[in-house]
Image: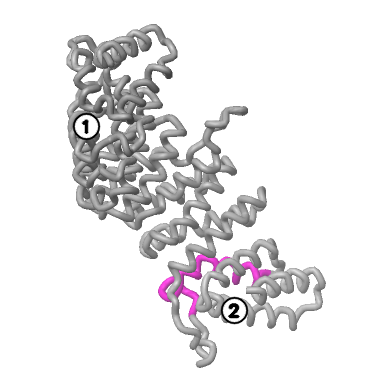
Amino acid sequence: MDIQRLVDAYIIGLGDNADNSSLRQTLINHIVKGDMSLLELVQALGSYLASEEAGRRSKGAHVLSDVLTELPESAIPAQATTRLVQFFCARLSDATCVPHVLASISALQRLSSFTDQCSVDVLRALFKEVHVQSFQHSTRSTAYKLLDQIIQSHPQVAKMMGDDTVLGFAQMLDGEKDPRSLMIAFQIIPKLAKLVDIKNNADDIFDVVFCYFPITFKNREGDPSSISPELLKSSLRAAITCSAHFGEMAIKPLVEKTTATSQSVKIDAYETLTAATQTYSPEVFASEMEVLIEQIREDVVMASDEKVVNAALDTLEAVYSVVSPAAPLTSSAAGQTPEIDETTTSLDYVLKDAIFQLTAEEVKNSDQVGKLLLAAARSSAYNCNVVSDAVLPIVVERLGSTEVLTLRRELMDVLNYVLSA
């Protein structure tokens, strides 16, 4: 068997854009049968891999990646995996070969013989040598997928490398525009945040991620590889809200987005704020509470779009569930009605306006007032108690003192909302 002849024919086929599937299968069969080893294949490619011509080096790396991608694990000795990883890591400094080298490393990464040390070597070389954004989408995608695979199969390595992993990933992502790559990158961030303490570098990750919010694009009709806009949007939301360390940086711009003229942006901002209540601290929300509640009240009262109203009310309920104190239900039993002022409860932002409306000669926007009170009351048992103690006496007293049907109907609307909490 003349290995060199097969390799040369393969290289020629690459230059002519010929179908090399038959030659590739021949090489694979020889390796599987033991007629030749991977080391011998590398040696046969030596003149190409060491060539001063970038095109020849790229073709040599191309042959290796084609073979490794389809070679069964049983045909790759464990000791060869480490040597091949070292070989490919050294080649990552050669930009011409990077696309094929990354494909080869990805093929090796799936092997059980791909050790933690292999993962360390690959990540260090990837972060140091590869300027990901200088390559075409297919190569960038391979780089993101490789990082994602290592995080999933060797999480201890990502954790051990700590800040290097976080900063390396931030550098990879900075400037990415393709939705397909962004989807992978967004899904990596929650995994990183769970494994690594990102506190020291939270601003680096946040800066390269939040710049995409709100993300808008239309998928290509008839393209099966096209990313769903909603899936991309939800992945970005999960990335932005995955760590409490993002809270202080995210809260103000998120609240500002709720004032957008675009309904889709409003909804996205509200849904992201709702999701953030699972991770951001109460203090983060408290800092923007007055502005946020005022905007929610405006959107609910305007009621220009039902989806916006529902999203705003969901946010109101979620935010009050983390901001308001989880006090025991003792005040009413003890006959102590909580005072409604800024020193006692953040519910003040909703209650003061509601009380103003309910004590006016004519109750306006009763349906909207009721919905706001319902969302606040549903946020916690304590908040329900506060809302009931503040509102019910006023409604009952007015119902008993007026015969005006329109006013009674408006008061009953509010009463029904509060009681349904």
Task: Report the magenta residues as a range.
Answer: 339-360
Image quadrant occupied by the C terminus = bottom right
Mark 2 packing: few (<14 Cα in 10 Å), some, or many (20+)? many
Mark in front: 2 vs 1: 1
Q: Point out residue 283 in the picture as x, y percentages from the top left corner.
A: 36, 64
Q: Which residue carries the number 2 mark?
A: 388
* Residue type, numbered disc 1: Leu
Figure check: 260 above or below 365 = above
Name which quarter of the figure residue 358 lies in. Answer: bottom right
Figure check: 146 above or below 190 = above
Question: Residue at 44% of width from left, 71% of height from top?
Answer: 342
First along the sequence among labels 2 and 1: 1
Q: CA distance from mark 2 to mark 1?
A: 70 Å
Decide if residue 262 is on the left or right side of residue 208: right
Q: Which residue carries the number 1 mark?
A: 84
Question: Residue at 44% of width from left, 41% of height from top?
Answer: 213
Name which quarter of the figure residue 150 lies in. Answer: top left
Image quadrant occupied by the N terminus = top left
Q: Nearer the viewer, residue 352 or 147?
A: 147
Residue 240's disc number: none
Q: Nearer the viewer, residue 403 or 214?
A: 214
Check if residue 366 falls in the magenta segment. no
Q: Point out residue 391 in the picture as x, y percentages from the top left corner.
A: 61, 76
Mark 1 packing: few (<14 Cα in 10 Å), some, or many (20+)? some
Which residue extends farthest bottom? 334
Q: Is residue 99 visible?
A: no
Name which quarter of the figure residue 71 lies in. Answer: top left
